[in-house]
Amino acid sequence: MANKILVFVEQRDNEIKKSSLETVKAGAEFAKELNAEVEAVVVGGEITDFNSIAKYGVPKVTHIKNPDLNVYTSSGYAQVLSDFANETGADLLLFANSAMGRDLSPRVAVKVDAGIVPDCVGFSFENGEVIATHPVYAGKALTDVKINSPKKIFTIRPNTFNLSDAADATAEVSVKEVDNVNTSVKVVDITRASDKLDVAEASIIVSGGRGMGGPENFAMLEELAGLLGGAVGASRAAVDAGWRPHSDQVGQTGKTVSPNLYIACGISGAIQHMAGMRTSKYIVAINKDPEAPIFTIADYGITGDLFEVVPALIEEIKKG
Amino acid sequence: MKIAVCVSHVPDTAAKINVGSDEKSIDNNGVSFIINPYDEYAVEEALKTKEALGGEVVVISLGGDEVKETIRKALAMGADSGVLLKKEGYFDSYATATALAEELKAQNAEMVFFGKQSIDFDSGVVGQMVAEMLGYNSVSVVVDLKIEGDNIRAEREIEGGKEVVETTLPAVITAQKGLNEPRYASLRGIMQAKKKTIEEKEAQTGDSRVELLKMRKPAPKAPGKILGSDASVVPELVRLLKEEAKVI
């Protein structure tokens, strides 16, 4: 049972994150299924686009403000969010399973006394109860779970809810100024690897493995990913060889991803790698070895030399 | 300084996972278990912290007798003593955090390390929950750490970059790959680990809030199409991605 759903909407640099809009959409669906109220909360920043939250079904938005909240502080965010959840009587909280959501939600869970299921990839509803699907062993198995405590928190993996159907809507925003923010844990600087899209959030991933032969050859994957608006990923073999940073690694000791399209180049398909990407909606495999396990989960396979296939793919996509 | 590191005992990443007949746990048959890979970075960082600042390192884990193997592994790397909080069967993140927080309080640990998540249940929330329960600061998914006096400066991985976080002791840090290069246990370390004590006590978990209804294998993917063996099929691939899959 849930009576009031609260969706945490994440801003970074005053921009609302796409994964949070997916969470908003989830909140709207939850509200419908559970016959509950739903509202959204944004912490910090100067936001101009609140209507994007309303567009995905949650018009009621509270913006909690204090200059100390403009940049993420886990202590401060946990404090103001828990206070707000308690004030509004929210009994079901949703977060995106982002770096911030994963850091913040467990602290909020303890503060508001809620059970928590992180990294959900699907939900069903039975007799007013939420059954969440949470992958375990990097996706080698799935668990269906429910939370029995009165308060509940779920974090939702990016790309679980698609944002195709948005309706025009206007948000009703209330601003809530707070004081005495606890900044005992404070972000003092953010360094970005250029404007790189992260594999965990990308809807298209072009990934390379040992078959890439060396770090210099990833340039063509960068080019292909750039053309497709995607990110470059890597197998553990490519990361362990020092060709790519660990932040690009897909698999059990890297990131578990579910993009719309995953293009695996020179990746044979170790168990731990496939566990991390098998929930991709479409998988393309390019590998010289027709026996490579990756072909068992690929939707489209080319058993050829990636050094010929990838450049041809780049040319074909450039044609438009 | 009292330093604690919390570790878990998990199936090897190369293990094939089959669901057991209870449909609530895995079939352990033929599965080899290892120390959670992220916990190795946590143990290494705990040892480096001790080497730099002095103190002692206690290793804590939760589970059945088999978990002692993983505690011994951390002891062989150089930790001073171990605690096994005994608990069989399924328990959720909240229950795990409750039991660990209780023990960490008793240990009076000022600096607590975890792996960023354990690769069995992949929750990645226990460290932060423990911090909240203890009233400690926390930084998760850390790839660089500096401790000077009571001040901590940590870098954590975020989407497409890093955050530099400042906080103070006491604190919980959860370790990400890249934080350090875990040492191998020396033969001497392995011999010494056999003599180190592992204290055993019942875990005070309280009730789990999350109920595991069912564990299952993901639906197998239908076999795909092999389009061909050279670049001549690329136009067909692009057509399929546009028209059939509609993903580009």
Image (spheres, rainbow, N blue to C red):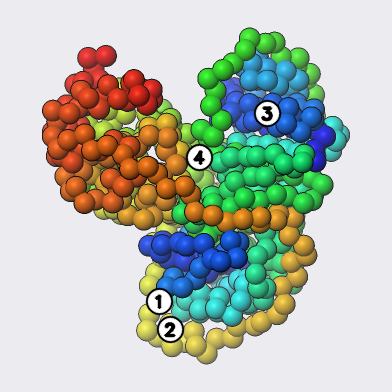
Label 4 CA crowd tier, 10 Å (few <14, some 14–19, many 20+): some
Q: Quadrant of the N terminus of chain B?
A: bottom right
Q: Are marks 4 and 1 on the same chain?
A: yes
Name the residue that disc number 4 marks. B158
Q: Are marks 1 and 2 in contact (CB under 8 Å)?
A: yes
Q: Secondary structure at mark 4?
A: strand
Q: In front: A276, or B22? A: B22
Residue bearing the label numbered 1: B185
Mark 2 lies on residue: B190
Specify which label sits upstream in the sequence, 1 or 2: 1
Q: Chain of mark 1?
A: B
Of callouts 2 and 4, the N-terminal one: 4
Give A141 or B220, whichever is nearer the viewer.
B220
At a point 36% along the width and 56% down the height, the residue shown is A271
Query: What's the distance in space between the residues labelled 3 and 2, CA to CA?
Result: 54 Å
Looking at the rendered structure, whether the residues under marks 2 and 4 are on a common chain is answered as: yes
Q: Amino acid at mark 3?
A: Glu
Residues at discs 3 and 1 both on one chain: no
Mark toward the start of the polypeptide (4 vs 1): 4
How far apart are the two marked residues, 4 and 1, measured between alpha carbons? Answer: 31 Å
Instruction: Tell me the residue that label 3 is attached to.
Output: A29
Query: Pointer 1: residues within 10 angstroms few (<14), some, or many (20+)?
Result: some
